[in-house]
Image: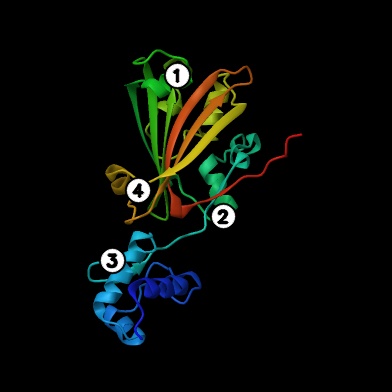
Amino acid sequence: MAIGYRDLANVLRARIEDGTYPDDHAGTLPKHADLAEEFGVNVKTVRQAVRLLEGQGLVTVVRRRGTVIRNRPPMRRLGAERYAKSKWKSGVVAFAADREASGRSWELDDQTNSVRLVEADAEVAAALGLAIGAQVYERARLVSDQGMPTHTLTSYYRPDHVSGTPLVSAETGPAGHGGGFAVLTGQGLEPYKMTESLHARMPTPSEIAHLKLPVGEPVMILRRITATADGQVVEFARGVHSAAHFEWSYSFDIPD
């Protein structure tokens, strides 16, 4: 008896996951007609199975190429370790620390920046201790890996903290040796404590376009507050991460 499209999708997904169909840059599923013949189903059933896999973010249908298996590179996003002072004081910024932990290289142009003065919304104002509508610097970064966008991170700063520093430069790459944390330290505002919150959701249309997301892939939303030892907040950041690009990793001592 012929199998249904859901059963076929399960078989194809298993083959993708076990490497039968490799997810390299050229990897594709067999042609629909070949799959139909192999499994004794009609092409319509194959198309339905492929649509299901596409909705799960495993494949993308590309005109004149076929059903492309999405490249899912293992990228560890470290927890506290990515912010270690020993890293950024020696010039290794957070996203580069993730790359090193994943055995991957990085280039300066993996991060592009856009900087402008904006009015603080309610969330930014509350984090930085300002009135809603107060002027803040917005530094928006798009980070890529081998030309593929992985995430955005947008940080907000008080102008009196960062005016005239590399944090208000839109030059490609991190904000100088050691990135933003090194800049803040040079301003007498050394980061000491961070609070991060995470949640998952489906992306907005603009996020789909910006991160080149396939149909069905969720995003991880990060919010980060960075403060000095005396509790002064020096950065509030919001990030949007392509969920398929990262494995989130945390190590910590268990509290008493």
| The residue positioned farthest toward the front in the image shown | 1
Between the C-alphas of marks 3 and 1, the distance is 44 Å
Q: Are marks 1 and 2 in contact (CB under 8 Å)?
A: no
Q: What residue appears at the point 33 percent right and 22 percent down from the top-left corner?
A: 118
Which of pointers 3 and 2 lies earlier in the amino acid sequence?
3
Please rate how many residues cluster around mark 3, counting C-alpha atoms within 10 Å: few if below 14, some from 14 to 19, many from 20: some
Of badges 3 and 4, the one in the foreground is 3
Q: Are marks 4 and 2 in contact (CB under 8 Å)?
A: no
- What amino acid type is highlighted by mark number 1? Ala
Q: Position of residue 94 (x, y in %)?
A: 54, 40
Residue 117 placement: quadrant: top left
Q: Position of residue 72 (x, y in %)?
A: 45, 60
Q: Position of residue 59 (x, y in %)?
A: 36, 65
- What amino acid type is highlighted by mark number 3? Val
Above-or-below relation of 63 to 238: below
Residue where numbered disc 1 is placed = 126
Q: Secondary structure at mark 3?
A: strand
What label sits on residue 61 in the rendered view?
3
In the shown orientation, is residue 71 left or right of residue 90?
left
Which of pointers 3 and 1 lies earlier in the amino acid sequence?
3
Between the C-alphas of marks 4 and 2, the distance is 20 Å
Please rate how many residues cluster around mark 4, counting C-alpha atoms within 10 Å: few if below 14, some from 14 to 19, many from 20: many
Residue 15 placement: quadrant: bottom left
Q: Secondary structure at mark 2?
A: loop
For the question of whether residue 205 can be seen, the reply is yes
What label sits on residue 191 in the rendered view?
none
What label sits on residue 211 in the rendered view?
4
- What amino acid type is highlighted by mark number 4? Leu
What label sits on residue 102 in the rendered view?
2
